[in-house]
């Protein structure tokens, strides 16, 4: 008997949480070589993912919209910092503008009430495009200078793939939560697999920090 979408998504969500927990343990084990920025990001993502899992088990689905908004804001701020620390320098002005946008976007998403039939996350398209832009700039750096770190390259690929899918999901969010599961389930499962892969690549970055050249 084939497992249902709900079963597959639950197993995937559980696996993601377990992966983050193991990664956090590895970061603590190698605390001297792991930057605080990476630990904060991993701990924040673990908190958000675990909260999402708990609310799912409690069948409280409305909270997911708030978790999604917080995750988008937190992810943009942290990934901006990670690119600045590991990939290439981002000017303080650009970082300041991104922080301002992240704060305003979060405030709008948290205050603006939407019902399940009309909920949208159009503002998150900008967030996802910004992150994809970071990945795109790094690809350009690679074209100019063929020397690159394999760990950073792999992480950059998964960041680009995941947030590209997030852009599509933000555009069609209403359709994806209000239509037949057999139509939209593959999109959510593919998103989950990419997210899991991104977390694994990120944990690998933290564990290899001591062996890498950091800008």
Image: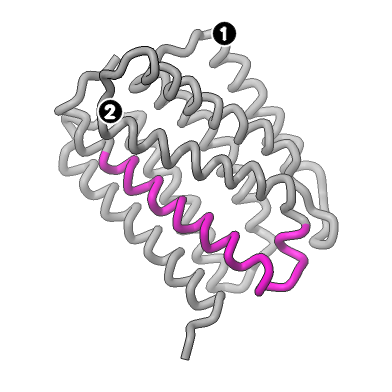
Please report whichever mark, 1 or 2, sits nearer to the chain's N-terminal start. 2
Nearest the viewer among 177 and 113 is: 177
**Percent position (x, y) of residue 13?**
45, 64
User: Would you say the residues marked 1 and 2 are in contact, meaning their CB atoms lie under 8 Å apart?
Assistant: no
Q: Is residue 67 above or below residue 126?
A: below
Residue located at (77% from left, 59% from top): 175
148 relative to 12 in the view: left or right: left
Q: Dot 1: what SS?
A: helix
Q: How many marks?
A: 2
**Percent position (x, y) of residue 68?**
61, 49
Q: Which mark is residue 35?
A: 2
Q: Main secondary structure of the magenta part?
A: helix
Q: Is residue 61 magenta?
A: no
122 relative to 210 in the view: left or right: right
Q: Which residues are magenta?
A: 175-204
Residue located at (50% from left, 42% from top): 161
Q: Is residue 54 above or below residue 31?
A: below
Residue of label 1: 93
**Percent position (x, y) of residue 150?**
26, 32
Distance from Cα at disc 1 to Cα at disc 2: 23 Å
Number of other residues with Cα within 10 Å of mark 1, as a class: few under 14, some 14 to 19, many 20 or more = few
**Percent position (x, y) of residue 44?**
44, 43
Q: Dot 2: what SS?
A: loop
Residue located at (68% from left, 38% from top): 124
Number of other residues with Cα within 10 Å of mark 2, as a class: few under 14, some 14 to 19, many 20 or more = some
178 relative to 50 in the view: left or right: right
């Amino acid at each position: 008997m084939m497992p249902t979408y709900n079963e597959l998504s639950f197993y995937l969500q559980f696996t993601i949480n377990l992966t983050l927990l193991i990664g956090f343990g590895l970061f603590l084990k190698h605390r001297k070589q792991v930057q605080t920025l990476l630990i904060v990001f991993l701990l924040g993502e673990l908190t958000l993912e675990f909260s999402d899992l708990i609310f799912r088990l409690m069948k409280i689905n409305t909270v997911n919209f708030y978790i999604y908004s917080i995750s988008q804001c937190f992810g943009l701020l942290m990934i901006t910092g990670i690119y600045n620390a590991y990939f290439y320098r981002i000017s303080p002005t650009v970082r300041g503008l991104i922080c301002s946008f992240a704060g305003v976007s979060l405030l709008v998403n948290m205050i603006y009430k939407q019902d399940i039939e009309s909920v949208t996350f159009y503002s998150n398209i900008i967030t996802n495009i910004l992150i994809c832009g970071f990945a795109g700039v790094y690809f350009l750096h690679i074209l100019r200078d063929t020397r690159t770190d394999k760990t950073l390259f792999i992480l950059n690929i998964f960041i680009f793939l995941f947030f590209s899918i997030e852009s599509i999901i933000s555009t069609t969010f209403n359709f994806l939560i209000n239509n037949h599961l057999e139509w939209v389930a593959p999109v959510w499962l593919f998103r989950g697999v990419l997210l899991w892969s991104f977390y694994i690549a990120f944990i690998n970055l933290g564990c290899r920090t001591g062996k890498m050249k950091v800008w």
